[in-house]
Amino acid sequence: MPFLPGNVRFTQVTVFLSTLTPKFYVALTGTSSLISGLIFIFEWWYFQKYGTSFIEQVSVSHLRPLIGGVENSPPVPGFSANNGENETNRQSLSECKVWRNPLNLFRGAEYSRYTWVTGKEPLTYYDMNLSAQDHQTFFTCDTDSLRPSDTVMQKAWRERNPQARIKAAYQALELDNDCATAYVLLAEEEATTIIHAEKYFKQALKAGETVYRKSQHCHPQNSQHEAQLRRDTNVLVYVKRRLAMCARKLGRIKEAVKMMRDLMKEFPLLSMLNIHENLLEALLELQAYADVQAVLAKYDDISLPKSAAICYTAALLKARAVSDRFSPEAASRRGLSTAEINAVEAIHRAVEFNPHVPKYLLEMKSLILPPEHILKRGDSEAVAYAFFHLQHWKRIEGALNLLHCTWEGTFRMIPYPLEKGHLFYPYPSCTETADRELLPTFHDVSVYPQKELPFFIHFTAGLCSFSAMLAVLTHQFPELMVIFAKAVSIVSSPGLA
């Protein structure tokens, strides 16, 4: 075909456009609207199912290698979607089960002092009601009627008014000066300082050990004595644990660590109390990182219920190995080292388990006093973890910087966490409701950070809307749209020359 000058081609284009009828433009815009709408529907369906844009995935996976591009973020080894699918059946368990906070504060010495200073109530009625149920479960049994002081304390744990509970505790001590649970109640609620609380707990320990030894001797007799032994064991473990926490708060860290280790060794079957989380926090304060790793090796098992303390402590130890010399710019140039990949994987794992923690650690969101109960993977657990562990992250140089550079990328790697996860079962959708019950009204409850819609979802939606608008205008005003189309072609036609 011979080469045509620009002005000749322009004339041919003008002649061709002048022969087109309004019906052609109506059909053209209608067809383009339909096609763009189908593309948008398919993109939306694909994103809902797989958590990513089909167009984006095809361009990254197939087109970029053809033009010599390199994948910026290769798949992280060990993060298989099959793991999440294999554990989906675990969702049938009570996914929104509420757990006792292993590091809960003292009612009188800490929560009440906060109320005196701020005028705000740090604990919700729901949270305190759960604690009342715990106390009745731990500290009462069917044989309470055999001891008048225990009968009084059984009523005391059911009292809603704090002063009524304290008054009942003193009545129990008048009946029996060795009533351990009465000292426990006074230590928790009447004591206004940790030192005062520790004195009460020491008295409770002395009384509790005496009663525990008596119950041990009566154990083989009948089921009632078995229940009594179980109750007296609970009291003794509770008191020893709180004494260890008092020592930790008063700066006697090594003493606290020894008490916790002895307690775990003496009562190994009470692992559901999560005493190891108290131990982890105390060891981190001592900067005994080898001992922390040893505890994690024992309790960080995929078959056991996880916690933010376990996942984020493991991530902290991995980050510690590389964070002091980590630089995003250098890593992008040379790629990640094996140690850096391990740290990034650990952070991704922790964020997948509880995505609310990083904003507290990075101080993007204000902390409050942790509640007495937490919901694993929820905002309440994130508050409780960050409240005690933020200082440990700050102590390790560069750890928070590595977290800041890494954590947001997790949501681009997890396909669709509300339906599927890599290492854990899908994120429970009921956590927001439960967290609002556990956390005070003045706290802005963190909800699961939804993945943002990919660019091509927005693009196809805009294209569909624009083409639909053109189709409607062309149908309503065909002559005007023909004139508009010809004018646009004339303006752009000099480029053909």
Image (spheres, rainbow, N blue to C red):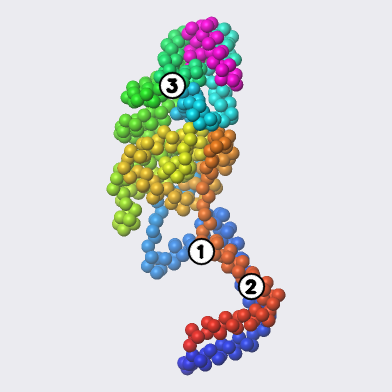
Residue 171 inside the magenta-drawn segment: yes
Disc 3 residue type (three-letter) = Thr
Q: Mark 3 sits on what residue? A: 193
User: Among all residues in the image, which is located at the extreme top?
Assistant: 175
Circle 3 or circle 2, nearest the eye? 3
Disc 2 secondary structure class? helix
Q: Mark 1 sits on what residue? A: 55
Residue drawn at 56 percent across, 20 percent down: 162
The Cα atoms of the two marked residues, 1 and 3, are separated by 62 Å
Label whose residue precedes the other's in the sequence (1 or 2): 1
Residue drawn at 43 percent across, 17 percent down: 196
Disc 1 residue type (three-letter) = Ile
Label whose residue precedes the other's in the sequence (3 or 2): 3
364 above or below 147? below
Residue 457 screen position, x and y as percent = 55, 61
Residue 383 inside the magenta-drawn segment: no
Q: Are marks 1 and 2 in contact (CB under 8 Å)?
A: no
Circle 1 or circle 3, nearest the eye? 3
User: Among all residues in the image, which is located at the extreme right?
Assistant: 476
The crowd level at tag 3 (other Cα within 10 Å; few <14, some 14-19, many 20+) is some
Viewer-proximal residue, 254 or 340? 254
Q: Could you tell me if residue 164 is visible in this image?
A: yes
Q: Is residue 436 left or right of residue 277?
A: right
Circle 1 or circle 2, nearest the eye? 2
